[in-house]
Image: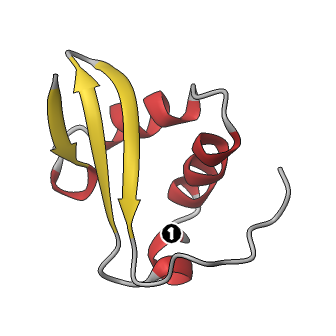
């Protein structure tokens, strides 16, 4: 297992697609915000995404944001 910072990864497209495969609502919302470049606009410019990976597979992720209480739209 390895922890990767999404915004420092040279393979962001792969990791974004892995996030998009998640079947939980947080993954779907994060994928949507990454596709539209809205994550940092909504959560703050210093927002970081940490990915727990197993090879090329995503095991989990965590977001560290300036603002952690937001009104997220229903998916």
Report the colour scheme.
secondary structure
Where is residue 19? Give x, y as percent: 49, 35
Given the current orientation, which residue lies at the most extreme front position? 69
Query: In the displayed structure, would residue 48 be above or below residue 12?
Result: below
Q: Which residue appears at 26% of the width and 18% of the height?
A: 56
Query: Residue 57 appears in which quarter of the rendering?
Result: top left
Q: Nearer the viewer, residue 65 or 41?
A: 65
Circle 1 Cα neighbour tier, 10 Å, few/some/many (<14 / 14–19 / ≥20): many
Query: Residue 38 appears in which quarter of the rendering?
Result: bottom right
Does 12 sit left or right of 69 as displayed?
A: left
Query: In the displayed structure, would residue 56 be above or below residue 40?
Result: above
Q: Nearer the viewer, residue 13 or 41?
A: 41
Q: Which residue appears at 38% of the width and 51% of the height?
A: 62
Given the current orientation, which residue lies at the most extreme right position? 74
Task: Tally the marks.
Answer: 1
Q: Which residue appears at 29% of the width and 80% of the height?
A: 46
Does 9 sit left or right of 40 as displayed?
A: left
Where is residue 43? Give x, y as percent: 50, 78
Query: In the displayed structure, would residue 41 be above or below residue 10?
Result: below
Quarter of the N terminus within the rendering = top left
Does 64 sit left or right of 19 as displayed?
A: left
Does 13 sit left or right of 2 as displayed?
A: right
Where is residue 28? Give x, y as percent: 65, 42
Where is residue 59? Give x, y as percent: 37, 24
Pointer 1 residue: 39
Mark 1 residue element: helix
């Amino acid at each position: 297992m390895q922890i990767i910072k999404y915004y420092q990864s040279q393979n962001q497209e792969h990791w974004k697609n892995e996030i998009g495969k998640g079947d939980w609502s947080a993954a779907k919302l994060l994928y949507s915000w990454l596709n539209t470049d809205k994550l940092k606009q909504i959560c703050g410019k210093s927002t970081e995404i940490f990915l727990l990976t197993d090879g090329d597979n995503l095991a989990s992720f965590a977001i560290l944001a300036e603002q952690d209480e937001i009104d997220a739209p229903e998916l």
